[in-house]
Image (cartoon, rainbow, N blue to C red):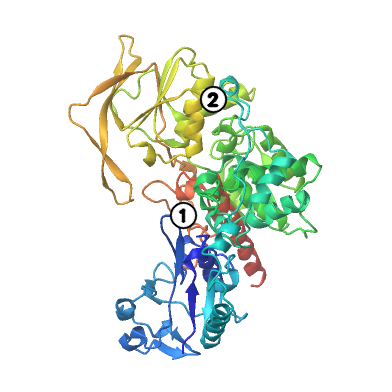
C-alpha cells in the first residue's frame, strides 16, 4: 500500500506550521526570498471553529498518474512522485485529483505554471516528513501499512479492555490552547493622554512581560508569526528567552534580524502582521508580540547592553547611504557589521526620516532615535545631517567617490483629491502638518518648508482612512481643536489603517463619518475653507485589487463645516532631478526601478546604485522598508566579493 499523511481535524489548531515546514523543507530549510515563493504542498483549511489540513493521499489507484501524458507522475517508494522537469503544464492531473491536492505553480516570475504536489519530503536529508515532524499537537501522522496495523491493534486492545476506543475528541487541541487571556501594555486614560504628546502606552513591567511570554504556544521555531513578519523575526524564540529571564540573549536575537526592534515594536501594525497571525488570536487574544519586542530592547539598553558587532575586519569599500529612514538605517547596519565604511546623508536634523518627523511622538518617543543614533555612530557609521542631496551635496560626487550608493529617500510627494479649492487657506496636506507638529514638540525651530498650523478652537476635518489619517486626527485633538472628524469614503471594515489606531482615536474624541466622499471645498468671503461638500456612498463591486468600490448615492449631498481640512490620502514619489543623467530608470509612478535579469533585486540600472524603501516600492510599512535596505546591503557585499575574485 502507499504512504500518505492523515490529519486529525479535532486536534488541528490552525497554526499553519505544517505549511511553513513544507515550504522551508523545499527551500533548503530557509525562508523563501519572495512572498510569491510561499507555495506549500499541504493546506490548512479554516472553518468556523475548527481547521483541518489537506494534502495528497498518494492513492493506490492514482488517477493523476493515469491522466499524465508524459509520465511526469509515477509510483516510487510507496508514494506518487512528480518529475517537474517532465511536466508540460497540461493540468490533466489537477482535473483528475479527487482531493484538490495538485496545483499549478510557477517557480519564478517568468516561468510557466507547472504541477506541484506533496512528495512526502522524499528529497529532504532528514528523511522525515516536515509537516508531521513540526505539528505541535501531532494532528498530522504518516500512515503506511505498519502504522495502520499499529492503529488497528491499539483499537483492538482498547476494545478488549473495555476502554474508550479513542481519546476524548480534541483533547490535545483543548490542552494546547488552554492559556490565560491577553493583557498587553496598559494605556494611559484618554482624557489624560490627549493633553500631551507622550507615548500613550506604559512600558511592560517585568511581571507583565513574563505573563505575556508564558502565553506563547511556541507552535514551532518557524511559525506563522515569523512568516507574516516581513523581517522574519525569530518571534517564538525571543519570547521564550523572555520567559526564561534571558533579556540580553533575547535582545541579541532581535538584532540579528532587525535594525530597529524597539521602534518596530511600537509602530508596526502588529494586528495585521505577527499578532494577526497568532494562533491565539481567536482564543483569548494574540500574544502581545509588539509590546514584548519593545520591552526586550528597552530593558537591555537600560541595563547598559549595546548590540554586539563582533570582531569585524575593516573592508576597503565605502558606501554612501542617502536617507536615514528605516531603509537607509537597515542598509547601513548590515554594511557596518561587515566592516564597510558607511556615510549616511539626510535632509533632516535627526536620523529616522519619517519615523522621527512623520510619526507623532505619542506613538514613538523621539529619544529612542537619539539613542539609536549613538548606537549606530558607535558602530562606525557617520551621519551627515541637514544635508540634502541635490542642494547641499552633489549626487554625482557621491557616485564618483563611493564604491556604491544606496537610495533610501522615502516618498514626500503628496496625493491630492483633485477638488476645486484645494489651494484655499486652511486646506493642508498631512505630511507637512505632521512634520511641523513633531518639530515643534522636539523643540526645533519652525521651518518655512513645514509651517505650523494653528488648530486651537477650530473645526478640523481629515479626509482619509489610513494610519496617516489617524496620526493627523490624534495630533489635532492634542493641538486643541474644537472638533475633529474623520471622513472616509468606504465603510469601517474597509479602512486600510491599523484597527487599534481607530480605537485610540475614538477614545480621544475623534468623530468618524463613513461612506462619505468629498465633492467640493466651500470658501468663505475671505477665501478660506469653511466647509467640504460631501455625498454619501454605498459599497459596490470589488475592483481589481479585491477591495469593494464606493459608489455615490444620488440626492445624498450635504456640507460638513470645516475651518481646517487635512488631506491624508497618502504619499507618492517626489521629484528627484539630481538622479537624471545617471542611468536610473523610474516607473510611471516615479518610483525607482530595480532588479531585472542579471541584477540584484535592489540594484538599479546603474551597477553602483541600489535603492529600497518607499522610493522603490511606494509608501508602505517601516518594516518593509527596512527589509529592502538590509537586502540591498547583502547584494552590495556580494558585489564587492565578486569584484575581489576578478
Q: Position of residue 164 (x, y in %)?
A: 55, 71
Q: Residues within 10 Å of mark 1 (few under 14, many from 20)?
A: few
Point out the residue furthest to the left here. 554
Residue drawn at x 31%, y 77% is 91
Secondary structure at numbered mark 2: helix
Label 2 sits on residue: 436
Residue drawn at x 31%, y 11% is 524
- Quadrant assignment for the C terminus: bottom right
In the figure, is residue 311 to the left or right of 455? right
Numbered badge on residue 258: none
Q: Position of residue 179 (x, y in %)?
A: 61, 50
Report whether residue 322 is seen: no
Between discs 2 and 1, the one toward the N terminus: 2
Residues 216 and 523: in front is 216
Q: Position of residue 531 (x, y in %)?
A: 32, 18
Mark 2 against mark 1, which lies toward the viewer? Answer: 2
Secondary structure at numbered mark 1: loop
Q: Residues within 10 Å of mark 2 (few under 14, many from 20)?
A: many
Q: Determine the image quadrant of residue 351.
A: top right
- In the displayed structure, would residue 234 be above or below residue 486? below
Report whether residue 468 is seen: yes
Label 1 sits on residue: 583
Amino acid at each position: 500500500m502507499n504512504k500518505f499523511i492523515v490529519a486529525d481535524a479535532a486536534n488541528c489548531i490552525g497554526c499553519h506550521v505544517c505549511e511553513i515546514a513544507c515550504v522551508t523543507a523545499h527551500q533548503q530549510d530557509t525562508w523563501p526570498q519572495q512572498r510569491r515563493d510561499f507555495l506549500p504542498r499541504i493546506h490548512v483549511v479554516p472553518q468556523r471553529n475548527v481547521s483541518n489540513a489537506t494534502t495528497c493521499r498518494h492513492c493506490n489507484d492514482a488517477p493523476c498518474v493515469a491522466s499524465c501524458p508524459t509520465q511526469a507522475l509515477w509510483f516510487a517508494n510507496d508514494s506518487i512522485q512528480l518529475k517537474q522537469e517532465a511536466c508540460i503544464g497540461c493540468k490533466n492531473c489537477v482535473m483528475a485529483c479527487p482531493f484538490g491536492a495538485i496545483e499549478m505553480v510557477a517557480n519564478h516570475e517568468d516561468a510557466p505554471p507547472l504541477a506541484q504536489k506533496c512528495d512526502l519530503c522524499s528529497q529532504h536529508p532528514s528523511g522525515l516528513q516536515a509537516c508531521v515532524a513540526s505539528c505541535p499537537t501531532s494532528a498530522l501522522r504518516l500512515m503506511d501499512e505498519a502504522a495502520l496495523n499499529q492503529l488497528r491493534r491499539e483499537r483492538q486492545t482498547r476494545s478488549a479492555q473495555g476502554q474508550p476506543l479513542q481519546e476524548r475528541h480534541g483533547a490535545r487541541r483543548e490542552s494546547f490552547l488552554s492559556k490565560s487571556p491577553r493583557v498587553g501594555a496598559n494605556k494611559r486614560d484618554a482624557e489624560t493622554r490627549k493633553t500631551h504628546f507622550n507615548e500613550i502606552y506604559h512600558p511592560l513591567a517585568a511581571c507583565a512581560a513574563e505573563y505575556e511570554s508564558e502565553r506563547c504556544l511556541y507552535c514551532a521555531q518557524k511559525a506563522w508569526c515569523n512568516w507574516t513578519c516581513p523581517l522574519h523575526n525569530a518571534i517564538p524564540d525571543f519570547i521564550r528567552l523572555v520567559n526564561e529571564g534571558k533579556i540580553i540573549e533575547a535582545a541579541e536575537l532581535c538584532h540579528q534580524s532587525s535594525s530597529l526592534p524597539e521602534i518596530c515594536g511600537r509602530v508596526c501594525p502588529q494586528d495585521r502582521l505577527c499578532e494577526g497571525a497568532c494562533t491565539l488570536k481567536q482564543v483569548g487574544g494574540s500574544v502581545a508580540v509588539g509590546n514584548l519586542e519593545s520591552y526586550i530592547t528597552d530593558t537591555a539598553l537600560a541595563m547598559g547592553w549595546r548590540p554586539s558587532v563582533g570582531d569585524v575586519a575593516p573592508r576597503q569599500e565605502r558606501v554612501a547611504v542617502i536617507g536615514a529612514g528605516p531603509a537607509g538605517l537597515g542598509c547601513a547596519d548590515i554594511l557596518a557589521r561587515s566592516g564597510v565604511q558607511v556615510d549616511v546623508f539626510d535632509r533632516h536634523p535627526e536620523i529616522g526620516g519619517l519615523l522621527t518627523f512623520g510619526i507623532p511622538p505619542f506613538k514613538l518617543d523621539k529619544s529612542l532615535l537619539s539613542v539609536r543614533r549613538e548606537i549606530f555612530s558607535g558602530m562606525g557609521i557617520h551621519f551627515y545631517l541637514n544635508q540634502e542631496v541635490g542642494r547641499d551635496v552633489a549626487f554625482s560626487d557621491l557616485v564618483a567617490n563611493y564604491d556604491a550608493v544606496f537610495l533610501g529617500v522615502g516618498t514626500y510627494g503628496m496625493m491630492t483629491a483633485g477638488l476645486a479649492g484645494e489651494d484655499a487657506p486652511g486646506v493642508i496636506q498631512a505630511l507637512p502638518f505632521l512634520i511641523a507638529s513633531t518639530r515643534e514638540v522636539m523643540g526645533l525651530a519652525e521651518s518655512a518648508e513645514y509651517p505650523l498650523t494653528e488648530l486651537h478652537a477650530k473645526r478640523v476635518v481629515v479626509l482619509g482612512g489610513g494610519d496617516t489619517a489617524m496620526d493627523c486626527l490624534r495630533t489635532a485633538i492634542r493641538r486643541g481643536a474644537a472638533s475633529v472628524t474623520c471622513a472616509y469614503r468606504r465603510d469601517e471594515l474597509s479602512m486600510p489603517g491599523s484597527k487599534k489606531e481607530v480605537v485610540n482615536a475614538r477614545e480621544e474624541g475623534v468623530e468618524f463619518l463613513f461612506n462619505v466622499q468629498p465633492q467640493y471645498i466651500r470658501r468663505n468671503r475671505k477665501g478660506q475653507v469653511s466647509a467640504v461638500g460631501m455625498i454619501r456612498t454605498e459599497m459596490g463591486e470589488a475592483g481589481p485589487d479585491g477591495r469593494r468600490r464606493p459608489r455615490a448615492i444620488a440626492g445624498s449631498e450635504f456640507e460638513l463645516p470645516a475651518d481646517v481640512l487635512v488631506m491624508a490620502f497618502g504619499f507618492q514619489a517626489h521629484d528627484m532631478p539630481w538622479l537624471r543623467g545617471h542611468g536610473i530608470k523610474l516607473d510611471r509612478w516615479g518610483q525607482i526601478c530595480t532588479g531585472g535579469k542579471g541584477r540584484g533585486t535592489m540594484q538599479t540600472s546603474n551597477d553602483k546604485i541600489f535603492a529600497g524603501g518607499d522610493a522603490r516600492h511606494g509608501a508602505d510599512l517601516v518594516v518593509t522598508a527596512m527589509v529592502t535596505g538590509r537586502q540591498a546591503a547583502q547584494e552590495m557585499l556580494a558585489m564587492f566579493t565578486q569584484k575581489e575574485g576578478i
